[in-house]
Image: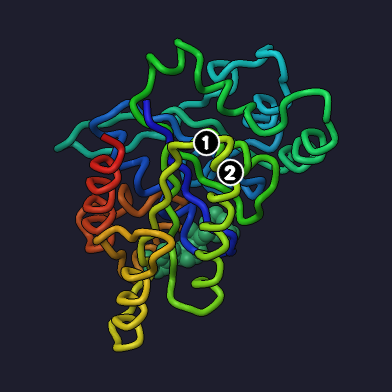
Amino acid sequence: MKIIAVMIEKGGAGKTTTAAALGCLMAARHRVLMIDADQQGNLSTLYGVADPEDKGLAALLSAVHGEVTVADVVKQSRLFGDKKTGFYRVDVIPANGYLMDTNTEIATDTENDQVRRLQAALSTPEVQGLYDYVIIDCGLLLDMTVLNALVAADLVVVPVKMGGFEASALGHMADTIEQLHGLTDALVLRSFFTMKGRNDASDQFEKWLKSFDRCQAFDTTVSRSVIVERASINQEPVTSYSPRCKVSREYAALAKEIMEVLK
Ligand SMILES: Nc1ncnc2c1ncn2[C@@H]1O[C@H](COP(=O)(O)OP(=O)(O)OP(=O)(O)O)[C@@H](O)[C@H]1O
Ligand SMILES: [Mg+2]
């Protein structure tokens, strides 16, 4: 079982779009668990499992002695797929505002482990035997929930859109991963260019990103497209809303590269 976290400390960077698109694609062929690690609960909404009363990931992270298991908090997503490929559901651990309390609770709980809680919950034989991939959509702040996600992960995928603040946020991700190396030696960091426009500035930015020596970039870039906005208004991952559009094909290429890195 391999764990992928999608993270950059920048709002609106395409984290949720990416996690949701990858999950939908990969679940057509593999056993996938999606985890919403953002109190905004956007991934939960896209997968049709948002519920303000359901503590979801907050309950799992609050339990320090394994009293709550993945099986206790998992929900079944809406149906994906089509007549041609068949229909399927994905397991999702949802999130919502309860995570705010959990973040404070973990930060002040110096008696128990603070950053290995998700790792512990995912390393049981039951979970390891049930899934091929776990995909975690992180929130935009490096809070206790996100730290738990990064410590549990094998690969951190960083979506980077064009801009100076995005570029420095990528540098900051590289710093964070270096700092975490004492806790997780095998953690790999990879970026990719998202929301790429068709202009010279985008081409220049792509060159810069692909030559940035602190974080290797995937070959695949994802274009900017109004279909992504339409999919999010329709509360659906783009790869299920429009499986054959350009962005979905690009996400399929990205998924392939990700699975290759994790082999
Ligand atoms: N390839 C794309 N083309 C056009 N719009 C996109 C693309 N990818 C993402 N977007 C749009 O950008 C906005 C932000 O995307 P998203 O919610 O995935 O970012 P995020 O990093 O998860 O944000 P947050 O930090 O708030 O969690 C959304 O409105 C989404 O529809
Ligand atoms: Mg998001």
Q: Which residue is mark 2?
A: 180
Q: Quick one: 13 or 154, which is closer to the camera?
A: 154
Inter-mark Cα distance, 2 to 1: 6 Å
Name the residue: 42% across, 50% down.
Answer: 189
Residue 94 coordinates in the image, percent (x, y): 57, 35
Which image quadrant for residue 199?
bottom left
Q: Position of residue 135 (x, y in %)?
A: 43, 38
Q: Is residue 80 left or right of residue 112?
A: left
Q: Is residue 226 shown above or below 175?
A: below
Mark 2 falls on what kind of element?
Answer: helix
* x 34%, y 65%: residue: 227
Residue contact between numbered discs 2 and 1, judged by CB atoms under 8 Å: yes
Label 1 crowding class (10 Å Cα cut-off): few <14, some 14-19, many 20+?
some
The structure residue drawn at horizontal position 63% and vertical position 36%, both measured from the top left corner, is 51
Provide the residue designation for mark 1. Answer: 184
Crowding around mark 2 (Cα neighbors within 10 Å: few <14, some 14 to 19, many 20+) is some
Q: How is the image coloured?
A: rainbow
Q: Is residue 154 visible?
A: yes
Visible in this render: residue 229? Answer: no
Q: Residue furthest front?
A: 182
- Quadrant of ligand 2: it is bottom right
